[in-house]
Image (cartoon, coloured by chain):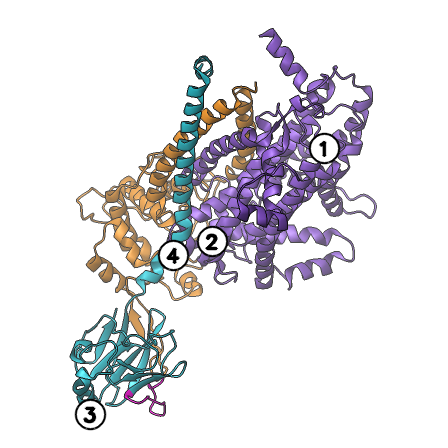
Amino acid sequence: MADSATHAQPSADGETRRDFLLYATTAVGVAGTGLALWPFVHSMNPAADTLALSTTDVDISAIQPGQAITVVWRGKPVFVRHRTPEEIATAQKEDGASDLRDKQTDASRVQKAEWLIVIGVCTHLGCVPLGQKSADPRGDFGGWFCPCHGSHYDTSGRIRKGPAPLNLPVPDYKFTSDTTIRIG
Amino acid sequence: MSGFQTNNKVVSWLDQRLPIFSMMQHSAIDYPTPRNLNYWWNFGSLAGFVLVIMILTGVVLVMNYASHTSMAFDSVERIMRDVNYGWLIRYLHMNGASMFFILVYIHIFRNLYYGSYKSPREVLWWIGIVIYLAMMATGFLGYVLPWGQMSFWGATVITNLFSAFPIVGEPIVTWLWGGFSVDNPTLSRFFSLHYLLPFVIFGLVVLHVWALHTVKSNNPLGVEIKTPADAIPFHPYYTIKDLFGIGVFLMFYLAFVFWAPNFFGEPDNYIPANPMVTPPHIVPEWYYLPFYAILRAFTTDIWIISAKLQGVVAMFGAILILFALPWLDTSKVRSARFRPLYRQFFWLFLIDCLILGYVGGKPAEGILITVGQIATAYYFFHFLVLMPVLGRIEKPKPLPASISAPVLKEKAHA
Amino acid sequence: MRKLVLSAIVAAGLTAVGGTAQASGGGEPLMKPGFSWEGVFGRYDKGELKRGFEVFHQVCSNCHGLRLVAYRNLAAVGLDQEEIKTVAAERELPDAPNDEGMVSPRPGRPSDKYIDPFPNEKAAASANGGAAPPDLSLMAKARVGGPNYVYSLMLGFVENPPADHPIPEGKYFNTYFPGNAISMPPQLMEDLVTYADGTKATPEQMAKDITAFLNWAAEPELDERKSMGLKVMIFLLVFTAMLYALKRQIWKNIH
């Protein structure tokens, strides 16, 4: 029926109608294909169980001043360092140092001055810096030294020298008691 | 490869060095197609569409699947529960397998009805059978991967088929398993091959289409394209018709995915594999049921040939016999439209296959054993006796002079 | 069009073959009480899920595991974060080794999967007369009849088994269990649990609620699946209609 109606129309009008239908169908088809691809893309984002594993409890009672431990949080190393009074003093004194590439005060990076908690992933290209063990090189500033491309971090985990652009990030954490922290 | 014209310098530069645009123009746009194809000719492109969906969903599923006996079942459930849209992708893959077989079965029966396997399309038909065999292997391997009860026992039963062969049978089965039972080595290799075979199928499909474009499509009348009036270019006529077919098919397919995702499945496969407990009633996936019925139809040893070996040989023979069909069929006429006798027997054969499928899904007991045996005998009777004889005794109806002749005649009447 | 209908019939015939494979099973025909999540527009009933969880938590979970469901998932049956933490902490599981290498238990967390009532299958079997109670995570999908089977089984106990069907010591007669002799004693007594929402806990009510909960445990995606399905179908109807119109336009001079 629709056919006979269009047959009766002048051909120019028929052409317009066909073009409109073609464009509209193409648009709907492209939109539908796009929407159909989203589940495939989104399936590669973190799954529900991965998202749920976002906290780690750490017992810090056994860490002596000057020592540090590494814990795993979201599959990444987190450095928990019990700083000595000298390290704290140095970190605070150098808040205004001219070589601070990513300016932050030491106070803004800790909740309790003796505990420095940072994600142990170099902000350059993702290596794990050295400095957790007493025998490790700690770089020119007494914090951490990344062996991959020579980034030096100070006792507040701030980048001082080398290619890394940013300070070692501080994860969300809270003291659940005097001797335990919960990261995440 | 002519007919491709462009003013775009870049396209032209590329095409002179690698003629992909000419090839597309030649095979997807200009390809002269009989003007009278009916909707039964949609199922080939539909099957190709599902193959792409299967590969796409499969590749994404693999990102979260663990092919180890201790983790496979739980990793599939993690996909169903925790991975974003994992349930959708897995159900698309699960039901996609059944859809692939539905489409291919219709495609095969369309081919049988219209005699598309006959000269000069024998090689086209052969490649099709190889695709079908590769699909059966892929489907079987894939069904093992979730490592549920049916996965495990299906794998055990099917691999044991090879033990029917005297002397070499047992070593072959041990080799297939990589051990002394279906276990982790078996799962790992099945996974590897399940990932490989779809790409083999894809390559075979390319050959299938190549052969098709060489000998051109058959059509409901079964007479070759003779004049330009018989053919129309593939694009836009058949591109739009195939796209419309995809729309209709998607509604059918997705109705299962969204509302009855386990319709084709077995409840037992939601029980983790247990090598110590066999489920009371093991059945293969529905698409193997006719062959499963043929396998079980043999119950008596004949001389030194065990019933088991007869069943296995008959089951493989039931598929291999298709390779000889172009020569078993002695008729000069392709389409069943002009073969009054063959048309009757075509429907009988279809019913026979459905009966075999029904029997294959039921426990082998009572009257069903006899029914299965009769249906099996008829299956081979159809190919070995009916097809050669019918071509000789049947008097076909007169063929139209060309594809466009009856069309023009109808127009004249209107 | 006639041909499309034909193809639909062939497809239906093929699928019927698939369907017959599912229809096998033993015992009486199952009861079909009708569930809220059945049908095209079916959805879970939140109240039913919550009550079902209460039955599971107070009764079933003493013997049965639910190992594929995480405590955090219980938000979907209407528990808030604090309730989830409480439920998770009721059982313990081995913690990671401490610095001395000692493994000590820790309470469960919301991110943990449901902790099994027994440490392993042998312990479960020995505490239950030799038959380990099966995990219930997928029970509503893993039996012929699905939720109807779960519902029927819960109400299928018969106190005096038929004389011609003796039941061994330590087993119970259940009309719907394959072979009838089940190791689980009848559970659903009048007022077995006290529902928080004040619903009267009749055996039928509890059977329906626990079936709803177990179906959710097996198919937590069902609500999202069906609502997405409706949107997709509406889209496809419109799109396919457009394709059909375009096809007719393109083909009008050919026929």
Q: In the rendered image, which residue does mark 2 sit on?
A: B60
Chain coloured orange: which letter?
A: C
Residue position marked by numbered label 4 in the rendering:
C68
Give the chain letter for cyan.
A
B66 or C64: nearer the viewer:
B66
Q: Amino acid at mark 3?
A: Glu
Residue at the disc numbered 3: A86
Do pointers 3 and 2 mark residues of a single chain? Answer: no
Mark 2 vs mark 4: tell me if same chain. Answer: no
- Which residue is denoted by mark 1 in the rendering? B117
First to last magenta residue range: A130-142
Which of the two discs, 1 and 3, sits closer to the camera? 3
Dot 3: chain letter:
A
- The amino acid type of the residue labelled 2 equals Val
Q: CA distance from mark 3 to mark 2?
A: 53 Å
Q: Residues within 10 Å of mark 4 (few under 14, many from 20)?
A: many
**What whole-number distance in Å separates the C-alpha atoms at marks 3 and 4?**
51 Å
Which of pointers 3 and 4 indicates the residue nearer the eye?
3
Q: Amino acid at mark 4?
A: Leu
Image height check: is B33 above or below B89? above
Seen at 81% across and 25% down, the residue is B389
Disc 3, disc 4: CB below 8 Å? no
Q: Chain of mark 1?
A: B
Q: Colour of chain B?
A: purple
